[in-house]
Amino acid sequence: MRVRRSLTIKQMAMVSTVAVVFIFVFIVIQLFYFVQQNRNDTVARMENMANSVRVPLAQAVLNGDITQAEEVLNTLNPAGIISRIDVVLPDQFQALGLNFVSPAPVPSLAIRIFDLPVEVSLPLYALEQHGHTQPLAYLVLQADSRSFYRFIISTLSTLLTAYLLLALILTVSISWCLNRLVVHPIRKIAYELSSLTQQNVISHQLHVSRLHQDDEIGMLVRSYNSNQRLLAKTYSQCTELLSEIQFLALLEGNKKGALLIVSSIQQGMECEALNSWQHHLSRLNWREQAGRLLSAAVTESVMVAQLNNDSFGLFIADISDPWIAMKQGQQLMNQLDEAAINQSIEQKSVICIGIAMFSQALSARDVYQRAVAATLSASQCGGNQIQFFESLNPELAVSTLAETSSPSDTLLNGEFAIWLQPQVDMQSGKVVGAEVLLRQLQSNEIWCLPEGLIERIEDCGLMVKIGGWVLEETCRVLASWQQRGIMMPLSVNLSVLQLIHKDMVPTLLSLLERYEIKPKTLAIEVTESRRIDDPQAAARILRPLHDAGVHIALDDFGMGYGCLRDLHHMKSVPVDVLKIDKSFIEEVPGESAMVEIIITMANTLGLKIIAEGVETEEQRAWLLAHGVTHAQGYLFSQAQPVTTFESQYLSSGQ
């Protein structure tokens, strides 16, 4: 694509014109200023010269001695600025006139503009009649107009040269800046648009450089991209599903929402016996059913794309909380399961869903890669899994996914174990329970919880599997104790990802039945650091467990960003125990206002209180004084292996 006249030439012409106009004004102003300055200097010098010959000239005029007067006046000739001197009598009769410089032509325009020649007139008085008002004659000095004209021309030339050079520099500088800031980006956009193919013209998105994020070019590009997304969305609603390229293009610019990638894994009960046409037909059936179901979900805030033969992408713009995204994924999986029931061949589609959330710090491709990683993790966990990607360090999570040895493998290798931290009645000093904590065996044969281990497990999508293993180990320990008549309760942390998993409730109820766990001896701790946006849904999940005798504890209370505002939510959730987070306990007895508020809230709701992280006697005394009797922390004991805990606290047959 070519242009007839470059924008660079136009802007240079405009800048030059404006610069010349303003420079002309400046030159005129400065020229008149310099000329007036020179005129004042010339007048002052001629007045000084006239005053130097005033007395002898007045004496010669009084005596009528013309020769003496001429001699006096000739003394002014060497100064070089006077062209003519006249002595004029009061009746305007010229008594004497001398020319020092031969007259030279001066343009009449200059004479009119600058009022040439410059003249000075002084009266001559007799010495003895100095105070008389009537002068003897007038001394008129006239400056050399030609010399004055040469000064004007010289000043004008200097100003023109300096300002035109300045105009040239300004024109080039301003044009270069405008060229870099305006012309080049516009030219790049024009070339990019002109090179579009018919296939990607609808989904094409322009890139906004960091230099133009906040100016009109950035606004133009964003408006273009917004119109393209609207056009592609309208086009997709009228035709088939979006392609992967179109989908990624439309995701650009979104800073809020959830991305779900739905993938199918074909598993046959007798895969070796399946013919290739049966396998192909099964995949076609699933693809058709999923495509039809997802297409029906397309709205102004929902986009759907077919990423490949077995994967679909679903973007929901009006979701900002992972809890809601998980619920949407669960509903979608249920719908796909119901649609797959009608398949006639003996092969089922195992559905895997990966979820990633948009944020201000992530680009659309970053979120897409996270969702893909979550989908891969879900497929590695087995059938019908939903995995959520949430990581402060996505590179670590992705590298974790690529590791050949995952945390799930270490379960079988004995690298994970549960340890118990005592929960103590601070009034009697008796151990009344314990919290189950996860520990991993390190290369130096030390058991500990490595920093970031829980986050890595969540990023890998293995929290449900490992959390289930922890629950079963806890039930196994409880069953062993209860067979010996020991009814000490144990509490287990449960992540939100475990809580909302569709198999969590039936799995835990099955464990309670299989190990014959007594009521009120198992407590699950739900971390409060995620806001419960749907208390009814939480109640539906927790109510069957509560009815089965499982105590519900709200862990890390006070750390959630919505806990105080959403206090009324807790009334509908079957919570028995409230655990005060260690970060608040560390501040007492100094900063105790928040802990007092939490204690008041728990008492109002009739909840049991357990203080976490008690490490000093001062903290213990303050808590007891405020009615908190149960606590755990290093003041009483660190976490211990199960065998050590049993030998230390259960040997007496508690």
Image (tube, rainbow, N blue to C red):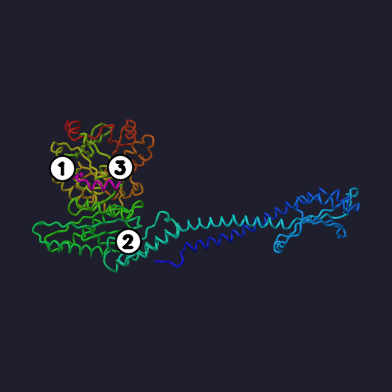
Residue 145, label in figure? none
Residue at (59, 56) in percent of width and height? 163
Where residue 520 sits in the image (x, y, percent)?
Answer: 20, 42
**N-terminal-most mark, 3 or 1:** 1
Marks 2 and 3, how far apart in space? 35 Å
Mark in the foreground, 3 or 1: 1
Amino acid type at circle 3 is Asp
Marks 3 and 1, how far apart in space? 31 Å
Q: Which residues are magenta?
A: 393-413
Residue 301, label in figure? 2
Reading the image, the residue beneath label 3 is 556
Mark in the foreground, 1 or 2: 1
Amino acid type at circle 1 is Leu
Which quarter of the image is occupied by the C terminus? top left
Reading the image, the residue beneath label 1 is 412
Query: Which image quadrant is residue 281 in?
Result: bottom left
Marks 1 and 2, how far apart in space? 44 Å
Cβ–Cβ under 8 Å for marks 3 and 1: no
Cβ–Cβ under 8 Å for marks 1 and 2: no
**N-terminal-most mark, 1 or 2:** 2
Secondary structure under tag 3 reads strand
Residue at (43, 56) in percent of width and height? 212
**N-terminal-most mark, 2 or 3:** 2
